[in-house]
Image (cartoon, helix red, strand yellow):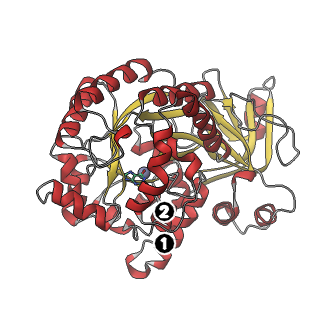
Amino acid sequence: MIIRATVLDTPDDPFAGGVLRAEDDCGILVEQAGVIGERGPFASVRADHPEEEVVDLRDGVLLPGLVDTHVHFPQVRVIGGLGMPLLDWLDECALPEEVRLRDVDYAREVARDFMTGLVDAGTTTALVFGSHFAGAVDAMFEAADRWGLRITAGLVTSDRILPDPLLTTPERAYEETAGLAARWHGKGRLRYAVTPRFSLSASEGILEACAASLAALDGAWFTSHVNENLREIAEVGALFDGASYVDSYDRFGLLTVRSLLAHNVHPTDAELATLAARGSAVAHCPTSNAALGSGLFPLRRHVESGVHVALGSDVGAGTGFSMLKEGLQAYFLQRLLGEQGMPLTSTHLLWLATGAGARALGLAEEIGDLSVGKQLDAVWVTPEAGDPLAVGLANARCAEDALSKVFALGTTSDVGGVWVGGEPITARGGPSRTGREPVGIRRS
Ligand code: GUN
Ligand code: ZN
């Protein structure tokens, strides 16, 4: 297959001098295993491969598949619970819903809603917070495998503070983790992530079990929450003898290059130095931070400390699956921070939503941009004729301006097709809402 499109991607980190790569009428040859074999002016790729099927995506722009580095599978049905800070929102919205996932049939329905949400938004890779119930985590991995998404996820573990049905013991957490990882870690595009909910709800015993699980699982990831809300941070300090939130994980050896912590809205300089020294990354979740009133993310301090940052939707505290919306919200926040903020261009936003996530998840060799040798993971943003985004793209001053319009105006209804490893995956199947012929196949 040769894809013919206007292609925008960020092969190099713009925080380190990388620039937007933009090619009009670009041809991308996708080979058997979903690998990009050739890329260049369409006419020349076509001339090299006159027999190949051509998929014409010239209407709109083609971006690398979007990467969501922090999203909660069991919370898809509670998106939009506004007006509460973190701990109240957990008690009133998130945790009662998470208890419902002990019913595996219910969990399967939620898993379908969740995959639909990801694909509809053009997200092809995600680090997913699973469920406290192993059966529900199996249901999520089953769905992810069927849909063909790149998912890293695991059993969420806790042994205090949460409602009883969500609690476990270190022994049970270790056993269930081992079973889930044996079934899913390394299967197709799936990987396992050891996932204590947060050190507020995880005793030393659970964190020790997490360390044991990581030691037993080659190439597994570690994820949790950190420094999200001031009340939460004070309570963690009290539970861990005044240790910092980052140290509550680091003292168990949980922070490495395969660790990614969500939020980090209120870090100390010492915590940033620890994260940089360990090579651990942070998932910035802008709509969640705004919706819960968690605080103003200090992106500049992260970048200056050498801590890698990517974007997360944090569904369901975040207000939807769209990584375009997260990018725009990140931009707004840095503008509003004035001198403390980090001015972001649309190139930074695309990087944060693609290459930065791929790097944070150790997948930069395979995905994150549309270079030769990488997997074809892509999203086609194609607004309906007359839509303000279509008008904006037609009148863009330059490629970076066109990309700004994608972030400012793009929504899930502009997603006309999604590919993972060269395979078309669309959530809606049949003719798209825009009335165009479908370019994907239904995977559910
Ligand atoms: N901290 C612990 N659990 C959660 C959660 O579900 N959402 C958010 N935003 N923060 C958390
Ligand atoms: Zn979260």
Q: Which residue is mark 1?
A: 333
Q: Position of residue 328 (x, y in %)?
A: 57, 65
Tell me what residue is drawn at x 78 percent, y 31 percent.
47
Q: Position of residue 126 (x, y in %)?
A: 50, 41
* Vertical arrangement, residue 253 with respect to residue 198, above or below: above
Tell me what residue is drawn at x 54 percent, y 33 percent.
107
Q: Work out which residue is located at the far bottom of the displayed protein and give it.
A: 338
| Disc 2 secondary structure class | helix
- Mark 1 C-beta to ligand 1 under 8 Å: no
Which of 8 and 92 lies nearest the eye of the viewer?
A: 92
Q: What is the number of callouts on the image?
A: 2
Which quadrant: the N terminus? top right
80 vs 172, left or right, is right
Distance (Cα) linking label 2 and label 1? 8 Å
Neighbour class for label 1 at 10 Å: few (<14), some, many (≥20)? many
* Vertical arrangement, residue 336 with respect to residue 102, above or below: below
Tell me what residue is drawn at x 50 percent, y 66 percent.
291
Q: Which residue is mark 2?
A: 286
- The circle drawn on residue 249 is none
The answer to whether any part of residue 198 appears in the image is yes
Q: Position of residue 100 (x, y in %)?
A: 50, 39
* Vertical arrangement, residue 339 with respect to residue 282, above or below: below
